[in-house]
Image: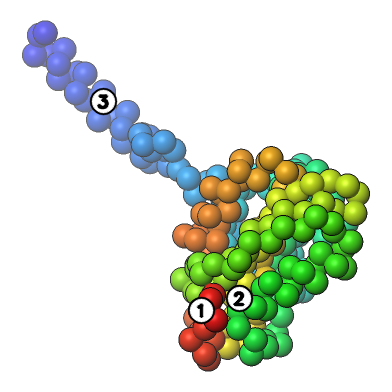
């Protein structure tokens, strides 16, 4: 290849790469941040990132998120798609977090008239950088729809946070990786959240 042609190709390559970087594109798969939306709770205790095309509603003490095209009605909990609820309480208890999480799941099952509840033992995990408990469960809702769910529970010095993620049976695996990312590297606590006063673990 002639030197002059090689020089022109090299210059063209530099211009192309510079243009891609300036435009926010990446040669390694695109700008992931543009595909995410930041969600903050009403008291600024935490924020996290979800896919930008998910539907989000923020109320006092509650965040409702749906993977569908329509916003989720938290009172309805219609199990026709994946959804996520985040409850925040400003009255923390001193019950061990694993025990408290199991109680909360059982209470939800009773109040919502679920049947066939199968709940695994709580396991230790993290939500953001904080210790948490997680429970996996399956059940049938009052409409006769089978579903799968994961529940996460975290306690700080002045708050408790319950995260509920649910999907119709057989569909949760489609969102499991996204759930792991949300409660893991995409969840951020404020500097005022504080750790729980006791060093609880999920097996207490």
Q: Which residue is mark 2?
A: 98
Residue at which label 1 appears:
201
Residue positioned 84% across, 46% down in the render: 145
Is 137 situated above or below 189?
above
| Residue labelled with disc 3 | 13
Nearer mark to the viewer, of 3 and 2:
2
* Quadrant housing the C terminus: bottom right
Q: Please say whether residue 97 is visible from this viewpoint.
A: yes
Rendered position, 167 above or below 154: above
Q: Position of residue 84 (x, y in %)?
A: 70, 57
Residue nearest the observer in this picture, 152 or 114: 114
Depth check, front residue: 116 or 8: 116
Establish if 17 lies above or below 82.
above
Q: Secondary structure at mark 3?
A: helix
Secondary structure beneath dot 1 equals loop
- Crowding at mark 2 (Cα within 10 Å: few <14, some 14-19, many 20+): many
Kindly indicate whether the residue at mark 1 contacts the one at mark 2 (C-beta within 8 angstroms): yes
Look at 64% across and 90% down and name the residue there. Answer: 94
Mark 3 / mark 2, whichever is N-terminal: 3
Label 3, label 2: how far apart the Cα atoms are: 56 Å
Answer whether labels 3 and 2 touch (C-beta < 8 Å).
no
Q: Residue at x 65, y 45 (%)?
A: 172
**If the image is split into quadrants, where does the N terminus sit?**
top left
Q: Earlier in the sequence, mark 2 or mark 1?
A: 2
- 109 to the left or right of 151: right
């Amino acid at each position: 290849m002639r030197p002059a042609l090689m020089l022109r190709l090299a210059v063209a390559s530099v211009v192309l790469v510079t243009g891609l970087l300036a435009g926010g594109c990446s040669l390694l798969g695109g700008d992931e941040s543009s595909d995410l939306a930041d969600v903050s709770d009403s008291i600024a205790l935490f924020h996290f990132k979800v896919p930008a095309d998910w539907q989000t509603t923020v109320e006092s003490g509650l965040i409702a998120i749906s993977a569908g095209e329509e916003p989720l009605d938290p009172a309805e909990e219609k199990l026709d798609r994946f959804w996520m609820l985040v409850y925040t309480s400003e009255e923390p208890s001193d019950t061990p977090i694993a025990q408290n999480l199991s109680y909360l799941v059982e209470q939800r099952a009773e109040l919502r008239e679920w049947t066939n509840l199968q709940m695994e033992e709580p396991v230790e995990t993290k939500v953001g950088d904080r210790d948490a408990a997680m429970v996996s469960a399956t059940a049938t809702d009052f409409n006769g729809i089978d579903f799968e769910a994961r529940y996460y529970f975290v306690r700080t010095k002045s708050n408790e946070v319950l995260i509920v993620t649910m999907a119709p049976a057989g569909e949760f695996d489609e969102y499991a990786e996204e759930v792991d990312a949300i409660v893991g590297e995409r969840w951020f606590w404020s500097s005022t959240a504080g750790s729980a006063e006791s060093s609880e673990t999920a097996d207490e």
